[in-house]
Image (tube, rainbow, N blue to C red):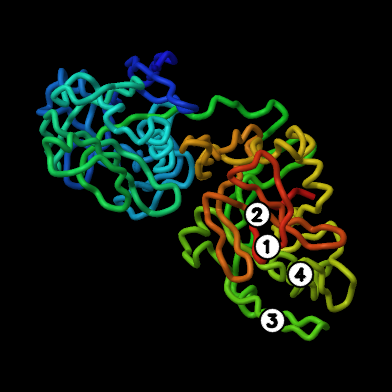
Amino acid sequence: MFENKGTLRDPRDGQVYRTVTIGEQVWMAENLNYAYPESTAKLESSSFCYKYEPDSCAKYGRLYTWGAASDSAGLFFDKKNLGAENGVSLPHISQGVCPEGWHIPSKDEWLTLLYRVGGDYISLMSKEGWSGLGSDAFGFSALPGKITGKYSYLSDVTTLFWGKDSYREEEVQLILVDSTRWPSKSEVVSGRQISELGYVRCLRNLLLPLSSSTGKGTLVDKRDGKVYKTVKIGSQTWMAENLDYSDDNLYKIVFSGDWGASQSIGKVTCLHNREFFCKQFGTLYSWSRALDSAALWSEKGKGCTSYQGSWKCDERERPVSPLRGVCPEGWHLPDSLEWEKLFDFVGGGDVAGRALKAQWSWIPIGGENGSLTSGNGYDSFGFEALAGGTENAGDFLTDGKFTAFVSVTTRRSSCVRLNYDSDGYERRSDSRCYVRCIKD
């Protein structure tokens, strides 16, 4: 059943691993055995061979603390101290301790694997060990290795793999158990550690390199010093992550329209009202805040907001484009024509969602007979649209399924929304959306 076999060479130490393709995913078919060099506060090392015997590592792979698995020391990427031991989850596809081009699986990716094998944990177990229970029907070849606390005891009863939760400050553990011989069950556990140590199975990134028409850069917002990634796509230069600007001025403004309504701009909104999600996905802006209705930085959106999809302004019919809004100096809110130009460049509106969505954070798409396909995008141009949800009429729409960006249209206000189950895009009059600024 598993014809798509291959190999992976880790350039850091030259070790070669078997790989296997299951559905759309390419997995290591054996446990990682890279010696992570960093120590911990309590231990001299953070990766171990059972009984410190090299032969054990050669067969079963190496046991890692979560700090080592997630590369909390920042040896292989520039976001340091992001292990669960510090209470913060990894903000992107996280290479962790994996070789370049591979990453620590997310909870959704583990669940996608389980759906692909029909929820049959036994099919992931190697025929070796497990007292003959494992079928290894897909070539995943998980060997048993019981882990307890800081010590490990190889047995034929259980094993455990690390993962991460893309949405919360939690690590994930996939546990395989021979429930006929041990009073427990195989499951994916989030938010609590069954063990301090676990094995690592790396998952390959989507092999879709950035278009040659793109160029990377950075933007420093002088108002608060935050640095954002940027990307040039065709002739346009976009922020490659969502804006996360706020200050006390944004909290105090009250907008009043001539239609007799009064709207408090209130606090900057994070998804689910949790500050962590602003760091993860950026800020959700009401139309008044996005347009800068108080004219803190520009007069073009003064006194303007959106009401039920229509523009409402005190002194004009609609905002004036190009409109800086809440964007940093030298950047502005994209209008509908600029969005259309982006979509045309990446292949057209029918495929723009798939091209611009990030390679992680989007939930799988359910099909017939319980089958799943990935809701993630290709991120072919480095735009990296994350599934940060949105907010409409006071209700947060599920993160993992949607994201929406402010678009300054001529006649009506709308957000450009990307969906987990669509390759295209749609326009919706959401109450709060994320902001992707475009360079003047």
Q: Quadrant of residue 75?
A: top left
Kindly indicate whether the residue at mark 3 contacts the one at mark 2 (C-beta within 8 angstroms).
no
Kindly indicate whether the residue at mark 1 contacts the one at mark 2 (C-beta within 8 angstroms).
yes
Distance, label 2 to label 1, CA atoms, is: 8 Å
Numbered badge on residue 306: 4
Secondary structure of the residue carrying tag 4 is strand
Q: Amino acid at mark 4?
A: Ser
Residue at (70, 64) in percent of width and height: 290
Distance, label 3 to label 1, CA atoms, is: 20 Å
Residue at (17, 30) in percent of width and height: 145
How far across and how far down the image is residue 356, in percent? 65, 39
Secondary structure of the residue carrying tag 3 is strand
Does residue 98 appear in the picture of this structure?
A: yes
Distance, label 1 to label 4, CA atoms, is: 10 Å
Q: Amino acid at mark 3?
A: Val
For marks 3 and 1, the one nearer the N-term is: 3
Residue at (72, 29) in percent of width and height: 213
Numbered badge on residue 289: none
Q: Quadrant of residue 297?
A: bottom right
Q: Amino acid at mark 1?
A: Asp
Q: Write down the residue under mark 3.
A: 254
Kindly indicate whether the residue at mark 4 contacts the one at mark 1 (C-beta within 8 angstroms).
no
For marks 4 and 2, the one nearer the N-term is: 4
